[in-house]
Image (spheres, rainbow, N blue to C red):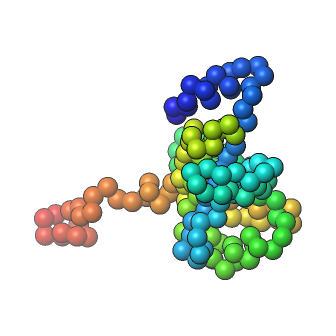
């Protein structure tokens, strides 16, 4: 990850002036357009797009041996809109989430960006937690055509 010099200086200072904000963009075939939210107390405009203020928690993908990286996203389970979409979209399968980190003082400068796919969702009365990852990409074969007994039995 390469952060801007201003971001690094602010993070390393004892009394940093600038606040780091996460922007979340959710895209899915069943959505009319991307859903854009930010974990801030006020809406944020970044890149000409409005991100609606809402509370959520995001953890970066982990790095564990023997398994693909996983990130988690947790929303408070308030209102019916999010659960209704999850139910209509078959659990949100096929959704892509792009997480961007910005500084409040420079909302058009993207400090960090990651795009992951939705793997699973669990919901309780108080929260909705999504597990995010890269499985679809990592499970694809490298070669489109390979020679093995099922494809070319005559050469084996």
Q: How many marks are shown on the rendered structure?
A: 0
Picture residue at 82% right of the left edge, 64% below the top: 77
Picture residue at 56% right of the left edge, 51% below the top: 47
86 and 20: which is toward the camera: 20
* Location of residue 132 by image quarter: bottom right
Residue 156, position as x, y percentages in the image: 16, 63
Residue 74 shows in this picture: no
**Left or right relative to 153: residue 121:** right
Residue 63, position as x, y percentages in the image: 57, 40
Picture residue at 75% right of the left edge, 28% below the top: 17
Residue 35, position as x, y percentages in the image: 64, 64
Query: With respect to residue 134, does 153 lie above or below?
Result: below
Residue 8 shows in this picture: yes
Picture residue at 60% right of the left edge, 74% below the top: 31
Return the residue found at the far bottom.
88
**Left or right relative to 75: residue 22:** left
Residue 64, position as x, y percentages in the image: 58, 41
Return the residue found at the far left.
155
Query: With respect to residue 90, does 119 lie above or below?
Result: above
Query: With respect to residue 126, does 7 lie above or below?
Result: above
76 and 37: which is toward the camera: 37
* Location of residue 61 by image quarter: top right
């Amino acid at each position: 990850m390469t952060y801007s010099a201003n971001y690094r200086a602010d993070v390393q200072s004892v009394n940093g002036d600038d606040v780091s904000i996460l922007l979340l963009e959710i895209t899915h075939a069943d959505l009319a357009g991307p859903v854009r939210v930010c974990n801030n107390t006020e809406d944020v405009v970044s890149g000409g797009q409005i991100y609606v203020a809402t509370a959520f928690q995001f953890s970066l993908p982990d790095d564990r041996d023997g398994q693909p990286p996983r990130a988690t996203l947790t929303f408070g389970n308030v209102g019916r809109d999010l659960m209704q979409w999850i139910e209509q979209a078959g659990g949100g399968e096929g959704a892509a989430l792009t997480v961007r980190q910005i500084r409040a003082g420079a909302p058009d400068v993207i400090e960090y960006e990651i795009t992951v796919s939705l793997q699973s969702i669990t919901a309780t009365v108080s929260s909705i937690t999504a597990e995010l990852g890269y499985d679809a990409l990592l499970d694809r074969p490298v070669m489109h055509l390979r020679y093995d007994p099922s494809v070319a039995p005559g050469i084996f």
